[in-house]
Structure formats: structure tokens, C-alpha cells
Image (tube, rainbow, N blue to C red):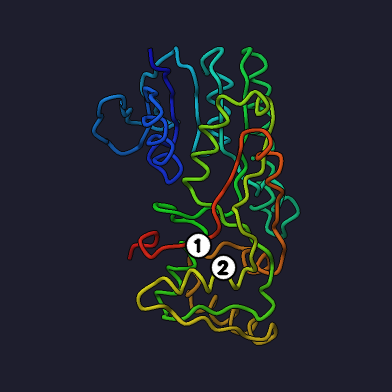
Amino acid sequence: MSRRALVFGGSGAIGRALVGRLLAAGWTVDALSRVARPSQPGLHWHLGGFDALPALPDRVDAVLSCGPLDHFSLWYADAGPAGARVVAFGSTSDATKQAADDPDERALAARLREAGDRLFAAADARGAAATLLRPTLIYGHGSERNLGRVVALARRRGVFVLPADAGGLRQPVHADDLAAAALAAIDAPAAAGRAFALPGGETLRYRDMVARTLAVLAPPPRLLTLPAPLFGVALRLAHRAGQLQGLPAGAVARMREDLVFDPAPARAAFGYAPRPFLPEASMFPD
């Protein structure tokens, strides 16, 4: 008899990849989406979100969350099934934005940490094992944040401007590698009750990450670097002209910061092996 999984955020970039991997591994899957989707053998889609949840199965072998950790942790603490294995995605933003200048970013980091604590406490109370997976910068088919914002800005103007000192280190991680990690963590005893950072398989500088991304587009937008003082002037002018919509506050400052995490604990616990950074044009539809 196949095992049954309940997947929150099943229609997102990680969720779609995870649902596919679960089905290929023989699982029966119940997945949630805010958009109606056709079910298929082994997969039943439920329409709804945390603000209006449909009736969900009360007996599953695993619950996996690929959406907002704070909302999921509140639901799980209140109504999660007893005994089910839990794997949930958070973010390394719980650490990188903890001391951000932007109060909204500090609040996000605090919510993520509180949600992680709530998740583990609720799992303990239910006699369940929980694993928290904390990705770095996510890319891949259907991922509209992070590099998707860079691409949108570059396409709008035909050029993307960076400060010459945008050399902070990054480890972009493919959504499918995160799905593989979640599936592997379910049956890994060493993953139970722990949180893991999930960086990508390559560490590169921010400007090199952007250059590699823009190079796959057709036509490729131009990448322009400016000395920091001149970039600051250009940034202020762009803000006044309303040309930086979609660029989060604090993003420019972090271009200079190293945001690097160690994959070794995840590798030892459940064989985590992410690919190097290989963007494709199909990941960034017009």
C-alpha cells in the first residue's frame, strides 16, 4: 500500500517539483493550490489556502510545506495530524536579515525564527518528527522572486546596473534540488528534529551570478557596473523616477555581503547534493 503525503504550496516552484518526485516514488499525494487544478492518478488537488482551507485528510504519513512557514506552523500547531512526518521549508533569511536596516526585513527574520520554534514544539507535542529546510536564493522554473526580479528590471530597461563592489558571495539553489532534499529527509532518521541550511552547489560572487543569468536571455540585457559613489547617485535618481519597483529594500546593501552557508550537515544527514548554478532562459518567461 502506497504512503500518503499532504503537500502545502504544491503549485509553487518547489511544490511542483516535490509533487512530481513523490508520485515517481510511489506516494499518493494530496496537494493544495489557490488555483483549481485537475487531479490525476495518485494526485488529488485541494482548492484553497490558509485563509480558507478545504477539508483535508486526517491520516497521512507525511506533511510537507513548500509555502509560507509562519502560516503553516500556525495551522500545524492548531490542527496538524498526529504522528505524521513533517518537512517544512523556511529560509536562510531568518539569519541574513536578522540585523537588517529595514524594519520589515528584521520582522520577517523574527517571524521565520518564531515559526521554526513553533513547528518543532508542535511536532514534539504530537509525537512527530519535524525537519526544517532553510534554502538560500532559490531559482528554477516558476520561481518569480530573487533572480526573477533582476531579470524583470533588466528586460524593462535593456540594462542592469550594479555597483562595482557587488562582490558578495551567493549560493543559488535550484528548486528541484530542494524538492529532492525534502523527499530524502522524510526517511532520514538523522534529519528528524533538526534544521538545515540548503545552499546551492556553487559559490559565486553576486555580479557573476547576475552576469550568468542575463547571458541566457535573448537578447541578453547589458550588465553595467559603476563606482559605488556614482551608483549611489544613479540609485537615488531611479528611485525618484519609480524605476525600481520590485527591488526589495536592503537588496542593494546585501549585494556586497557574503551570504554563505555550509551544506555539510544536510549532506551527512540525507545525502544532499545540489547542482552548480546553471540558469536557463526558460526559467524566466517574458
Q: Splitting the image into 4 quarters, where does residue 190 fall?
A: top right
* In this view, 143 is above or below 51: below
Q: Nearer the viewer, residue 264 or 67?
A: 264
Name the residue at 65% across, 68% down: 205
Q: Which residue is mark 1?
A: 147
Name the residue at 31% across, 27% down: 43
| Helix, strand or loop for disc 2 | helix
At which x and y percent is residue 49?
41, 33
**In the image, which is nearer the foreground, mark 2 or mark 1?**
2
- How would you rate the neighbour count of disc 1 (Cα within 10 Å): few for under 14, some for 14-19, many for 20 or more? many
At which x and y percent is residue 273?
58, 45
Q: Amino acid at mark 2?
A: Met
Quadrant of the frame with the C terminus:
bottom left
Q: Which residue is mark 2?
A: 209
| Helix, strand or loop for disc 1 | helix
Q: Which mark is residue 54?
A: none
Q: Amino acid at mark 1?
A: Leu
Q: Nearer the viewer, residue 44 or 22?
A: 22
- How would you rate the neighbour count of disc 2 (Cα within 10 Å): few for under 14, some for 14-19, many for 20 or more? many
- 29 left or right of 114? left
- 8 left or right of 168? left
Quadrant of the frame with the N terminus:
top left
* In this view, 133 is above or below 220: above
At which x and y percent is residue 124?
67, 17
At which x and y percent is residue 13?
43, 46
Contact (CB < 8 A) between labels 2 and 1? Answer: yes
- 44 left or right of 200? left
Name the residue at 36% across, 22% down: 28
- Ranked by sequence position, the earlier of labels 2 and 1 is 1
Q: Nearer the viewer, residue 269 or 213?
A: 269
User: Label 2 vs label 1: CA separation?
Assistant: 9 Å
Name the residue at 42% across, 71% down: 216
